[in-house]
Amino acid sequence: MKRSRGSTITNEIMPLYHLPIGKSGVVSSIEAEGITRRRMLDLGLVPGTKVEALRVSPGGDPKAYKIRGAVIAFREKEGSQIMVKYKEG
């Protein structure tokens, strides 16, 4: 799909933790297992859920995300197990 002036729109799948601050994505899969997976599902992180990267702590970890109207923080370990589709362009 092309935009005007020759720029392109790409759909990139990336770990939630790498989603740029201020940008939104849609959960495509959860790669966590066990209790961590259960916690994510309990928070409403299922494929198709919209998430927005809000801010990063002063130390760089964790990062805060808006998920279904709530602000939730994930450390890099957890955020890297949530795959999101990010529409760039």
Image: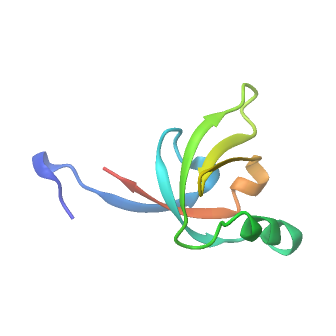
Q: Which residue is drawn at 66% across and 34% down?
A: 56
Q: Is residue 37 above or below residue 65?
A: below
User: Which residue extends farthest front?
Assistant: 69
Q: Is residue 81 above or below residue 55?
A: below
Q: Is residue 10 above or below residue 72?
A: below
Decide if residue 17 is on the left or right side of residue 25. Answer: right
Report the quarter where the N terminus lies.
Answer: bottom left
Q: Which residue is drawn at 81% across and 74% down?
A: 33
User: Which residue extends farthest top?
Assistant: 58
User: Which residue extends farthest left?
Assistant: 5
Residue 40 horizontal/vertical position (percent): 74, 65
Residue 74 horizontal/vertical position (percent): 74, 49
Nearest the viewer among 9 and 27 is 27
Quarter of the image holding residue 11?
A: bottom left
Q: Which residue is drawn at 62% across and 72% down?
A: 46
Render colour scheme: rainbow
Decide if residue 88 is on the left or right side of residue 49. Answer: left
Q: In this view, does 44 lie above or below 51?
A: below
Nearest the viewer among 43 and 74 is 43
Decide if residue 23 is on the left or right side of residue 49. Answer: left
Residue 78 horizontal/vertical position (percent): 76, 56
Instruction: State the count of labels.
Output: 0
Q: Residue at x 74, y 48 (%)?
A: 76
Quarter of the image holding residue 53?
A: top right
Residue 42 horizontal/vertical position (percent): 76, 68
